[in-house]
Amino acid sequence: MATATQVEGERWSRSRRVSFAAILAGTMATGTFPAYALGVLGPAIIEEFHLTRLELGLATTIFFLVGGSLSLAAGNAVDRIGAKSVMLASFVILGVALLGISVAPTYAVLMAFAAVAGLGLAVGNPVTNKLVAIHLPAGRRGITMGTKQAGVQFGAFLAGAALAPFAAVVGWRSALAVGAIIPLVLAVAAAFVIARDVRHVGSRQPRGPLPTGVRWLAAYAFLMGSGVATLSAYLPLYLVERTEATAAEAGAAVAALGLIGVISRVGWGWASERLVTFSTPLVLLGAGAVVGTALVIAVESFGFWIAWPAAIVLGATAVTWNSVGMLAVLSVSGSEAAGRASGAVLFGFYIGFVASPVVFGWVVDASGSYALAWALVGASFGAAAAVAVGWRWFERPVPRRSAPSIAQDASSK
């Protein structure tokens, strides 16, 4: 007999599914867009505020520090207050933060608004994962999950393909100010498209510890996040400094990485839900990211053209793990704890983002070379693949279809 959630998932019209997935993708895109914007606009920001590479990395670090440290609280808020309410608040916060960065008179003020943007970042995955968990049954989540995670890479694509050339014409401040309108528009759309999630909201029932699989995924997320953070923060600057590429050409390479990531996240989301476990694709994604990093290192020796295959490989692996990882989170946690489990995994992911840009910038400034810094990035990706192997070996991850829906949770009580 079909559960209520399964029936709802089957009855949704195609237009409603598309609208639902689009809002979730927009949530992910706007939540991470400030990091990609700071990376793409890095050369202009360094010139205006007379910054070092380390100082530029600190802006990205504070963004992810706030987002990471608050992700656990955000996950709890989503489970207790409701996903839709938290989502609308995050859109407003991000709009204000982007506008604040665009008018920042000093580096300190820019850092302050980067921290404010981190508030919006903290809720992105917990709120969207919760909405997927309560509206779609297990086995029907893959494409929607991949699409909403592709929003992150759409944000990267938007930063490289639109923000960079637009900033070249009107200046980085005006370009970023226009970008601040996007989350406000999404807030209006979400108010009409997203239904209020009433199940479990405000629940005061005792909550047990999260499954150990969440810890394995948090460790994997930390290592992947450590590598991905440096890509968003330094890849454009690296291409400009070590090749004859212009800022626009470097932005185009980042845009290509983002575009491949958009397609790959949808594909990996669809494919991984058809495998017995999620650990196998996680291993492949980590190993593929090592190859992509090796190609980035080769750019300095062979020229800018190597950046294109590097972008393709990294777009298909390093920045794509989230679509598989978030499905795995829902699988091991169940729907009632989806927000809390997502917050725990994202805590690991964003903490990885915090330290790596600073360490990367310090290594480059101290050594005068990018090679060692990129080698450390590749090592982080390789360690992530090893963690995924360990998860499969020691714990036997939960099969993809075993996660209960909310309706199943309720019917078992």
Image (cartoon, grey):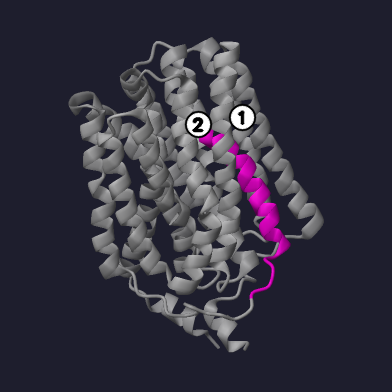
Residue drawn at x 52%, y 62% is: 75
Q: Among all residues in the image, which is located at the extreme right?
A: 394
Judged left or right of residue 55, residue 50 is: left
Binning the other alpha carbons within 10 Å of mark 1 as few (below 14), some (14 to 19) or many (20 upward) gives many
As drawn, 223 above or below 337: above
The secondary structure that most of the magenta stretch takes on is helix
Amino acid type, label 2: Leu
Disc with the residue nearer the chain's start (1 vs 2):
2
Q: Quadrant of the N terminus?
A: bottom right
Q: Please tell me whether mark 1 sits on a helix, a strand or a loop.
A: helix
Q: Position of residue 112 (x, y in %)?
A: 38, 39
User: Is residue 271 visible in the rendered structure shown here?
Assistant: no
Residue 369: image x %, image y %?
Answer: 57, 13
Which numbered circle lies on residue 377? 1
Q: Give the magenta range.
A: 207-231
Which one is nearer the viewer's eye here, 107 or 199?
107
Inspect this view and state whether residue 64 appears: yes
Residue that appears at 33% across and 18% down:
47
Q: In the drawing, does residue 392 fall left or right of residue 348?
A: right
Residue 170 x %, y %: 18, 28
Disc on res. 231: 2
